[in-house]
């Protein structure tokens, strides 16, 4: 059997590529190298703009053409850096040589020695990762996450008044509404979204061991902390003043933990929706031409939610590993973070794929209100809570002498199915006030949803 031509190993680069390809703009080797070029060129321009070491600010047109190297970065540049790295065996050094070539092309050899000036590779890398991860999260992952939240919000509002039997411990429980249950998930996701949006993307720029040693020797008169702070913040990042050779990656650990938390909330949503589908609460809308089972023609499987579950688990496993690994570096630096950070795109890719599946899955279900109504009408015993609570209130108010209301209702309802007639008869015989009796007699499982509908208001935009 002849060998296959080269194939992607990861399904993210194979069958699922259309759903996650936007991440490659930032979290690929090419995206990282473009960011490195960005940092190297911006550092050189920062030095010349501040006339460091006798340099002068570049003419505006030359500065524009130099910045265009980043803006026009494409396949030819990717290939050129790869060729350089084949010789240097060092990724950041290859980028430095690439930038030097661009300077030569622009007639800027006189400032070539300011390329990578005073930098350790990690000065370039940590800023590049901060820029690419920030862009991937804010431009790609967060919009997909927000789209899921908005669809859930829409359905929560639509179903806010549709009563549903709750199932605590998998058993019939005090009714709620489908809208309120979806609103709970929206509220949870909104909280973690705000935390993710509030991420501090930190950067360091302080040399081989974070001491500015080489910089200070080169110019003892410069305020190198101010220079470092100015440069890092000019990139839109937060300056980290105290580091070893590497930025400590704590912000990354915090971000990955939050996204992993978001994944787990979404996982909870998937398992609940899957269960509601199996109970008939949600009907699945068949997709034209789709096959649910290779042998059972009738089936419409909840594959979107199952696929999402698996990808959320993979994403969280990777994100948890990243968060645990990146915060540890032996002494002033080891390379464990180098390979680890190259998997950030894989971790976010599985989450992004899950979001795509959840959004699609939510668009392929419809609420079967008649099934919910039948289920409620078959479980009148859930009103036992209401009855015993009202009796307690009546006892406290002096309108009843019943000794143990809870035990009384437990005897009537526990492990038994009872209907409306039996409950009405039971209530009529209770030693409570007439107004309380009438309130209980009028109660139905579908009407026993408390403030469920009003609670949905908490996920509506504030006026």
Image: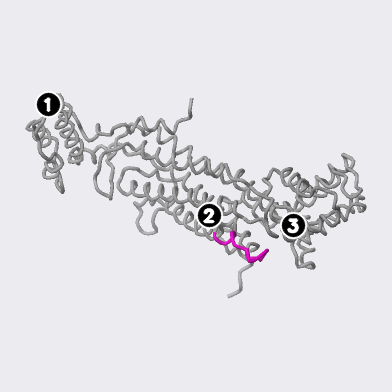
Which color scheme does this rendered protein use?
one colour
In magenta stretch: residue 420: no
Q: Nearer the viewer, residue 9 or 215?
A: 215
Q: Nearer the viewer, residue 121 or 401?
A: 401
Between the residue at mark 1 and the residue at mark 3, the CA separation in whole angstroms equals: 80 Å
Residue count near mark 2 (Cα–Cα under 10 Å), binned few <14, some 14–19, many ≥20: many
Which numbered disc, 2 or 3, marks the residue closer to the eye? Answer: 3
Going by the picture, which residue comes out furthest to the left? 429
Is 2 on the left or on the right of 306, as rendered?
right
Is 422 on the left or on the right of 365, as rendered?
left
Q: Nearer the viewer, residue 339 or 76?
A: 339
- The disc placed on residue 211 is 3
Q: Is residue 257 visible?
A: yes
In magenta stretch: residue 326: yes
Which numbered disc, 2 or 1, marks the residue closer to the eye? Answer: 1
Q: Which residue is mark 1?
A: 433
Main secondary structure found in the magenta portion = loop
Q: Which residue is mark 2?
A: 350
- The disc placed on residue 83 is none
Q: Nearer the viewer, residue 418 or 252?
A: 252
| Pointers 2 and 3 in contact (C-beta within 8 Å) | no
Name the residue located 11 percent from the left edge and 33 percent from the top edge.
427
| Pointers 1 and 3 in contact (C-beta within 8 Å) | no
Q: In this picture, which residue range is highlighted in magenta?
A: 324-336
The x, y position of residue 119, in whole percent, is 78, 57
């Amino acid at each position: 059997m002849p060998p296959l031509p080269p194939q992607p190993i990861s399904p993210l680069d194979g069958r699922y590529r259309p759903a996650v390809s936007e991440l490659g703009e930032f979290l690929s080797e090419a995206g990282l190298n473009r960011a490195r070029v960005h940092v190297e060129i911006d550092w050189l321009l920062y030095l010349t703009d501040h006339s460091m070491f006798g340099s002068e600010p570049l003419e505006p047109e030359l500065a524009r053409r130099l910045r265009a190297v980043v803006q026009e970065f494409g396949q030819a540049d990717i290939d050129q850096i790869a060729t350089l790295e084949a010789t240097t065996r060092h990724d950041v050094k290859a980028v430095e040589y690439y930038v030097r070539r661009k300077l030569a092309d622009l007639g800027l050899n006189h400032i070539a020695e300011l390329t990578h000036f005073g930098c350790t590779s990690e000065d370039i890398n940590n800023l590049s990762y901060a820029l690419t991860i920030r862009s991937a999260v804010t431009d790609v992952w967060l919009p997909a996450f927000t789209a899921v939240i908005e669809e859930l919000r829409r359905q929560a509002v639509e179903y806010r008044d549709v009563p549903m039997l709750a199932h605590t411990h998998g058993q019939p429980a005090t009714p709620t509404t489908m809208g309120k249950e979806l609103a709970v998930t929206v509220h949870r996701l909104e909280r973690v979204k705000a935390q993710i949006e509030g991420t501090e993307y930190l950067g360091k720029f302080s040399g081989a061991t974070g001491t500015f040693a080489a910089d200070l020797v080169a110019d003892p008169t410069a305020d190198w902390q101010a220079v470092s702070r100015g440069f890092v913040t000019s990139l839109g990042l937060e300056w980290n003043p105290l580091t070893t050779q590497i930025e400590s990656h704590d912000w990354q650990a915090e971000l990955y933990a939050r996204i992993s938390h978001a994944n787990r909330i979404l996982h909870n949503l998937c398992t609940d929706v899957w269960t509601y589908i199996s109970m008939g609460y949600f009907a699945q809308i068949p997709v034209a031409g789709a096959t649910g089972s290779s042998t059972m023609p009738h089936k419409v499987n909840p594959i979107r939610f199952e696929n999402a579950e698996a990808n959320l688990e993979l994403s969280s496993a990777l994100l948890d590993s990243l968060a645990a690994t990146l915060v540890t570096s032996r002494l002033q630096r080891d390379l464990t973070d180098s390979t680890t950070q190259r998997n950030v795109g894989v971790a976010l890719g599985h989450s992004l794929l899950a979001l795509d599946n959840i959004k699609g899955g939510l668009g392929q279900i419809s609420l079967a209100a008649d099934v919910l109504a039948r289920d409620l009408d078959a479980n009148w015993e859930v009103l036992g809570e209401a009855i015993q609570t009202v009796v307690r209130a009546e006892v406290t108010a002096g309108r009843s002498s019943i000794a143990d209301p809870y035990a009384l209702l437990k005897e009537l309802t526990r492990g038994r199915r009872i209907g409306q007639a039996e409950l009405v008869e039971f209530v009529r015989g209770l030693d409570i006030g007439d107004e309380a009796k009438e309130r209980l007699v009028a109660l139905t499982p579908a009407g026993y949803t408390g403030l469920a509908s009003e609670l949905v208001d908490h996920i509506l935009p504030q006026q």
